Image: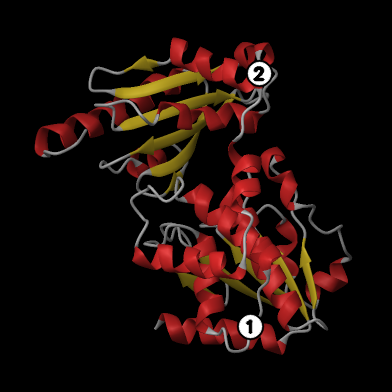
Amino acid sequence: MNHETKLQILNKIKAHDRIMIFRHIRNDGDCVGATKGLKRIIELTWPEREVYLIASDGAEYLKFLGPDDEEVSDEIYASSLGIVLDTASENRISNKKYKLCKELIKIDHHIPLENYGDIYWVEEERSSCCEMIVDFYCTFADELKLDSEGATYLYTGMVTDSGRFKYEGVSGETMRCAGALLDIGIDTETLYANLYLDTYESLKFTAHVYEKMQMTPNGVAYIVVDRAMQEQFNLTLEQASACVSDMDSIRGCIAWIAFIETGDEKDTIRVRLRSRFVHINGVAEKYRGGGHACASGSTLYGKEEIAALLADADAVVKEYKETHEGWL
């Protein structure tokens, strides 16, 4: 079935002279890598095609991958095939002009909240959307082209969304796709330096996270990064949100959560939920969010909701620990 869907997508791309590529708000390595990677494949394979990637926001830590395209007229959107990558629901598409496109394709690896679009290819067992784009390339490698630049975009998404290939969704197919990209040629040393080297100031913030983080009765680690803390360490919301990864190596802690105050008029709090073994996405879905089983996000309005979410997460972890063995 998926081969037929991939063939449909290939034929749609062939049938359109203009393609618009879209991704989700609050960019991450996967949505940026997948959109840039697919754009590169199309440009190399069909140089005469017009391919646009226009997003409303960008992640600071991914600027080394280069800028997106400048805005174009509504007429260009209206004459284009739209392809949305790594976005489970329409309300999370960053560029709302996707609605102007003649036809729309959805390619995603999240739990399917909405099957929007004229064609949708969703494989939630995949470790990343970039893995799906590599699979697409490999399936039709006899006619599609990819170079080191495009491989670097796609490898970036695979590395970041899989936690450097250590998360639950990583499979043999994941590693075969990664191998195909490495065979094309990637400067992994420079890539990892761009992605993971920390500044002195950011390391001081990490130390502060370890000092201030707390634990629920059943072992959910959490940190509240309020506006004062963000100002103290001169953090963007992206940098503050990334601290969730600082809590991923605590023995006996199988879920960890970062709460990030945004300081807006709605008193919005971004929530990043991560886990191993136990699936935590049900908690995220209860609080206006969703995502993967072990990596999800949600949105709170007001500090009083923090306690409620923590109680729900703690209950999920408690039940898991009481009914399972082998967790660390």
Q: Position of residue 273 (x, y in %)?
A: 42, 35
| Image quadrant assignment for residue 198 | top right
Q: Residue 91: in sight, yes or no?
A: no
Q: Is residue 270 above or below residue 116?
A: above
Q: Is residue 32 above or below residue 199?
A: below
Q: Residue 273: in sight, yes or no?
A: yes
Question: Could you tell which of marks 1 and 2 lies nearer the N-terminus?
Answer: 1
Quadrant including the C terminus = top left
Q: Nearer the viewer, residue 151 or 62?
A: 151
Residue at position x 27%, y 23% from top? 219
Q: Position of residue 215 (x, y in %)?
A: 33, 17
Q: Residues within 10 Å of mark 2 (few under 14, many from 20)?
A: few
Q: Which residue is mark 2?
A: 201
Q: Amino acid at mark 2?
A: Glu
Quadrant including the N terminus = bottom left
Q: Residues within 10 Å of mark 1 (few under 14, many from 20)?
A: some
The dot on residue 219 is none
The dot on residue 144 is 1
Dot 2: element: helix
Q: How many marks?
A: 2
Q: Amino acid at mark 1?
A: Leu
Residue at position x 42%, y 51% from top? 165
Is 163 positioned to the left or the right of 310 in the image? right
Q: Is residue 17 above or below residue 117?
A: below
